[in-house]
Image (cartoon, helix red, strand yellow):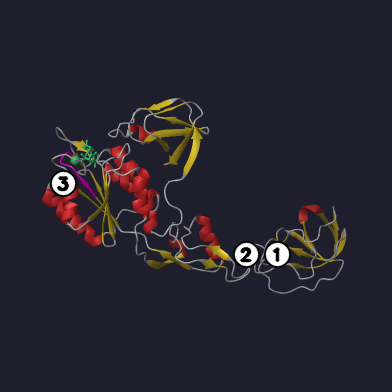
Amino acid sequence: MLKIEEALQVINDQQIELSTEIRKLSDSLGFAVSSEIRAPFDMPAFDNSAMDGYALCGISKEYQIIGEVAAGDAEELDLREGEAVRIFTGARVPAAASAVMMQEKTRVEGEKLFLDELPKEGQSIRRKGGELQKEQLVFDKGYTITPAGISMIGALGMDQVEVFKKPIINLITTGNELVQPGKAKGEGQIYESNSFAISAAAENFGFPVHKKHSLPDDFEQIKTGISEALEQADILLLSGGISVGDYDFVKQALEENGVEQQFYKVFQKPGKPLYFGRKANKFVFALPGNPASSLSCFYIYVLPFLQQFSGFQQKGLPKFQFPLKEPYYNRSDRPSFLKAKIENDEVRILDGQASSMILSMAHANALAFIDAETNLQIGDLITCYLIG
Ligand code: AMP
Ligand code: MG
């Protein structure tokens, strides 16, 4: 059985052939750029005004107003010492201007401009190249495009961008007892919720699930289901049937489909029977069926892999340390990811940690990592993975 770090290392060490595509700027949110982006020109491209006010030539408190420049005007005004022009935010500042004074600190009488205070050299002028110089690095390869990133790329004049493709993800749930929500539930049956949870979590991080199937605990059907899914998908996620029960057929069905096991079982709680396999450039995670285990394994193992497959620099859930609000004893003999709530910069371990329970996870905003058989006191620093 692997330790958590070893399992994560196996995942991280996979050699993956990444592929790229060109996307419209408006459809590029959450994709990672596939090569570095450099500024094609200086930004700003010309000296411009940071204020609505007056561009001034020379440092004084009185000027003669000789004209006006609005945003977008291309004409170059010739300013001489003691002269000023009315100017607006973003408008090109005349080359000879020493400063811009905001209009709130000025008074106009006819063609005469009076300032409340002396301007400082360069004041309220946004200089050419002040943010970026031509050829300067804007984004490294693997930068994941945020809304502000879209603004930046647009400001560079690009209406499309080359990014790493995201994987096609298929999801199969297994279990004779499972009934889809909305349908009538018979004796001994439960509602299938893992597929909704996993799809939602994946989607939340920008990885939509392409296709979902729910299969009974039938070896042949699971084998065929895996074979069909692998024809289409880059990444196949399975839920349930990976434990040691007589009806747990997933592992053998994967083997018979030529999937090579990379690891099976991780020394952790929840999620011990986690499986990771590979067939050529296709990858399989078989997640334990218990709802909290499957979601926990998704966050800790599947998410960073989806990001790796998509060329992201940043991988995994955001991780921070918070002081414990109430004492906690982890009686498990395995390191644990516990459902926890961060509030007012403190973290509290929630009640109801059994793998079969999802209520505590639905109220949690973090998974707190706590070592096996550890007794923790108020104020002890805990590593928390943010889930919401
Ligand atoms: P398994 O890993 O198949 O042994 O399932 C472990 C537990 O998780 C059992 O109690 C199952 O009923 C439950 N379970 C399995 N799959 C799902 C699912 N898709 N939604 C909700 N519960 C599930
Ligand atoms: Mg099962």
Q: State the image coordinates of residue 235 (x, y, percent, origin top left).
A: 29, 56
SS at circle 2: loop
SS at circle 3: loop
Q: Label 2 is placed on what type of residue? A: Leu
Q: Marks 3 and 1, Cα distance to the nearest angstrom?
A: 66 Å
Residue in front for this viewpoint, 110 or 92: 92
Residue in front for this viewpoint, 188 or 102: 188
| Mark with earlier residue (1, 2) | 1
SS at circle 1: loop
Which residue is at a point 29% across and 44% down the rendered structure image?
196
Residue identified by numbered label 2: 132
**Mark 1, mark 2: which one is toward the viewer?**
2
Residue identified by numbered label 3: 249
Q: Marks 1 and 2, Cα distance to the nearest angstrom?
A: 10 Å
Residue identified by numbered label 1: 127
**Mark 3, mark 1: which one is toward the viewer?**
3
Give the magenta range.
Answer: 172-177
Magenta-colored stretch includes residue 37: no
Q: Where 55 falls versus 250 (above or below)?
A: below
Q: Give the crowd class for mark 3: few <14, some 14-19, many >=20 residues within 10 Å.
A: many
Q: Label 3 is placed on what type of residue? A: Phe
The C terminus lies in quadrant: top left
Query: Ligand 2 near label 3 (Cβ, under 8 Å)?
Result: no
Quadrant of the rendered structure where residue 107 is? Answer: bottom right
* Ligand 2 falls in quadrant: top left
